[in-house]
DNA sequence: GCGGCGATCCACT
DNA sequence: GTGGATCGCCGCC
């Protein structure tokens, strides 16, 4: 039994709660007529106000991040290090500028296509297929053209499935790669599924 | 207008 | 374990 997550889900006012709630949901894409999907196993919350790590910190609006200021339920894709498109989910209400970064998924369907997109065929390294935000986008076929799409549409969407054991196996930690954010760098706003092999390996 | 740097990944040593 | 790729944003001149 599965169902597509409704807009209401994304418009909850607490992005940290949502980042945790997104663990265990299914992220699905249908791109170029081909379906791929995986269970979300790692996320990070970014808050538009009072969060130095957020692109929209203090409500700062630019051409790149403008979609963050819309109502929740849209995709925010941006280019990181000039190379990697990273997929985020806009949450909360208009002008709150909150978002959740999807850092890792556990692949479920369309595995051969994901391997092809990632140019990774060795089954020995299968845990590297989607264990990082840039890898997730590449495996699912998400790129900059998918900026601003509704997540209740038929290109990128999320589904809820029965998963009774997920909740008690969620752990938190500080977010990755945001050392510049001062005291906000230590906020425990990264969430991940304990012992899942697809959770990203953190460089220290 | 310019230069430094980033919510990363991979090839190479 | 290290450094290069490569583009948009922002601070400063």
Image (cartoon, coloured by chain):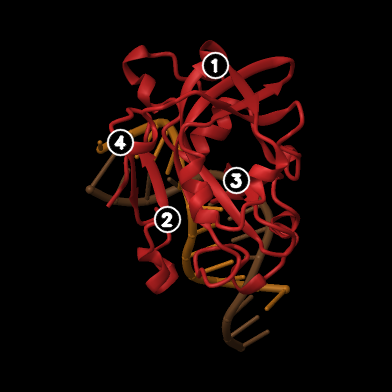
Chain colours: A red, B orange, C brown
Is there one chain holding both mark 1 and mark 4? yes
**What's the distance in space between the residues labelled 3 and 1, CA to CA?**
23 Å
Q: Could one spot residue A75 in this view of the protein?
A: no
Which residue is rendered at x = 32% and y = 36% of the image? A169
Asked if residue A171 lies left or right of residue A115, the reply is left
Quarter of the figure with residue A198: top left
Decide: few, some or many residues near mark 4? Use Cα within 10 Å; few <14, some 14-19, many ≥20. some
Q: Is residue A138 above or below residue A119?
A: below
How far apart marks 4 and 3 lie (CA) works out to 22 Å
* Residue corresponding to mark 1: A116
Density class for disc 3 (Cα within 10 Å; few <14, some 14-19, many ≥20) is many
Residue holding disc 4: A194
Q: Are marks 3 and 1 on the same chain?
A: yes
**Residue drawn at x 47%, y 50% as measured from the top left:** A44
Dot 2 corresponds to which residue? A189
Asked whether A116 or A197 is in front, the reply is: A197
Can residue A73 be spotted in the picture? yes
């Amino acid at each position: 039994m599965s169902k597509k997550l409704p807009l209401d889900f994304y418009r909850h006012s607490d992005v940290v709660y949502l980042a945790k709630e997104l663990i265990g949901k299914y992220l699905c894409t249908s791109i170029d007529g081909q379906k791929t999907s995986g269970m979300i196993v790692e996320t990070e919350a970014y808050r538009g106000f009072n969060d130095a790590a957020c692109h929209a910190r203090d409500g700062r609006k630019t051409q790149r991040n403008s979609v963050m200021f819309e109502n929740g339920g849209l995709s925010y894709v941006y280019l990181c290090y000039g190379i990697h498109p990273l997929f985020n989910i806009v949450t909360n209400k208009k002008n709150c500028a909150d978002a959740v970064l999807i850092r890792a998924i556990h692949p479920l369907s369309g595995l051969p296509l994901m391997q092809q997109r990632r140019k990774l065929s060795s089954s020995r390294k299968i845990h590297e297929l989607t264990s990082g935000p840039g890898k997730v986008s590449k495996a699912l076929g998400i790129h900059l053209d998918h900026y601003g799409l509704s997540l209740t549409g038929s290109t990128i969407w999320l589904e809820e499935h029965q998963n009774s054991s997920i909740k008690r196996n969620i752990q938190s930690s500080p977010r990755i790669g945001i050392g510049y954010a001062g005291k906000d760098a230590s906020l425990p706003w990264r969430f991940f599924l304990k012992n899942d092999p697809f959770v990203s390996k953190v460089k220290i």
